[in-house]
């Protein structure tokens, strides 16, 4: 196995000190342009790659950002991550993406590992409303931004969709069908977005003169399988026509499968809406009615907020760092297609 070229090897190969090589590689003004070019050309010739991890520990900082997402197999998060990565890349940062699968213990483990990597900051979607990771980041003094969820509405810096309004718009639309049954396949109850969407659902029902019944809400749905199984149980006990509102397009995919397996038609027998506007579902029949969420912009905004936090630390002393939290709440858009 070929040995990795080290800084020491460059210095020995050129007959100069390690300090001189280091200055050239870091564009230090104390070294002449001629010597700098000579060292850089030689480094390229021998395929020298800087050891960023070793450098980061010497300097007590890195250009690495940790992204901890609850489920990066969900196309929603794929767009969010893209916005984060592209924005951070422009500012010279690199990303390491970790997937918690809504597992609180795994998320806490990841935060410890990211601390060990000496990351500059973290962008986090807290699993199942987990508070511990946020507390650890504070204790470790690692700047962070929450995306798509928050822990406390008035605390921390975060970027989210206006989830209450999103659910309100969807439920109001379904109320127009006149059916007295509007089911809601919701997410994990400890998550802020699920709580806010439930509030929006209730508000719409009240305004439309419908009574809220807790047995019409199915909590704990996280993916297509949950949507499928929940919809099967609903169809076993309830005869269409009725309406269904899904926390996400991901859940809606499973629900649609269960409806079609039973021989029912959308929207004539069951009117159904998702949330997130996953691109591919606008090309699949029947095209899904959903809530448009600016996923890419959410990623970009969360990265920009983190960069602001990092730059403020570079410009100010620890005592001067501003603790003001920033909240970005993005507007949803109701996209009516063929399932309602």
Image (cartoon, rainbow, N blue to C red):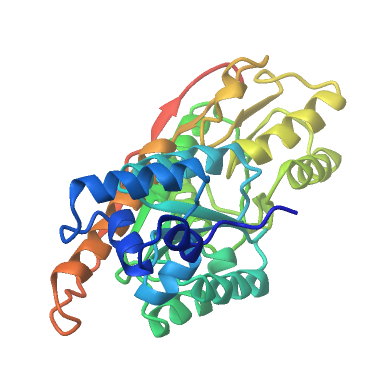
Please determine whether, in this image, residue 218 is positioned above or below residue 339.
below
Q: Is residue 340 visible?
A: no
Q: Residue at x 52, y 79 (%)?
A: 132
- Residue at the image position 36 percent from the left and 80 percent from the top: 141
Residue 274 placement (x, y as % from top left): 57, 34
Image quarter for residue 29?
bottom left
Q: Position of residue 27 (x, y in %)?
A: 24, 54
Count the marks.
0
Q: Which residue is located at x 20 percent, y 57 percent?
A: 31
Where does the C terminus fall, quadrant-wise? top right
304 vs 314, nearest the viewer: 314
Q: Nearer the viewer, residue 96 or 7?
A: 7
- Measured as percent of width and height from the top left, residue 12 is found at 46, 62
* x then y, percent, for residue 165: 38, 44
The reply to whether residue 110 is in sight is: yes
Q: Residue at horizontal 50%, vertical 50%?
A: 48
Instruction: Specify whether 80 is left or right of 105.
Output: left
Image quadrant where one finds the N terminus: bottom right
Left or right: where 124 falls relative to 230: left
Report the side of 128 relative to 230 (left or right): left
Q: Nearer the viewer, residue 240 or 162?
A: 162
């Amino acid at each position: 196995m070929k040995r990795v070229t080290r800084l020491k090897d460059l210095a020995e190969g050129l007959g100069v000190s390690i300090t001189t090589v280091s200055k050239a590689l870091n564009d230090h003004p104390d070294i002449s342009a001629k010597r700098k070019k000579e060292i850089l050309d030689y480094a390229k010739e021998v395929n020298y790659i800087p050891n960023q991890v070793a450098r980061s520990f010497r300097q007590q900082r890195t250009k690495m950002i940790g992204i901890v997402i609850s489920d990066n197999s969900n196309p929603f998060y794929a767009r969010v991550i893209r916005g984060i990565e592209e924005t951070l890349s422009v500012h010279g940062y690199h990303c390491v993406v970790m997937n918690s699968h809504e597992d609180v213990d795994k998320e806490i483990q990841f935060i410890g590992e990211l601390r060990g990597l000496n990351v500059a900051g973290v962008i986090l979607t807290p699993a199942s409303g987990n508070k511990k990771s946020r507390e650890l980041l504070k204790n470790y003094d690692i700047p962070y931004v929450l995306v798509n969820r928050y822990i406390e509405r008035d605390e921390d810096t975060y970027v989210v969709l206006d989830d209450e309004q999103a659910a309100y718009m969807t439920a109001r639309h379904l109320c127009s069908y006149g059916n007295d049954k509007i089911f809601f396949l919701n997410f994990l109850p400890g998550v802020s977005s699920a709580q806010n969407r439930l509030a929006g659902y209730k508000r719409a029902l009240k305004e439309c003169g419908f009574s809220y019944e807790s047995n019409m809400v199915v909590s704990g749905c996280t993916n297509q399988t949950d949507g499928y199984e929940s919809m099967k149980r609903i169809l076993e006990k309830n005869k269409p026509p009725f309406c269904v509102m899904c926390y996400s397009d991901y859940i809606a995919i499973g629900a649609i499968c269960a409806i079609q397996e039973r021989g029912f038609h959308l929207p004539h027998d069951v009117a159904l809406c998702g949330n997130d506007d996953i691109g591919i579902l606008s090309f699949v029949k029947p095209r899904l009615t959903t809530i448009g969420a600016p996923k890419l912009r959410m990623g970009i905004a969360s990265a920009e907020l983190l960069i602001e936090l990092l730059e403020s630390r570079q410009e100010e002393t620890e005592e001067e760092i501003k603790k003001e939290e920033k909240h970005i709440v993005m507007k949803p858009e109701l996209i009516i297609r063929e399932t309602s």
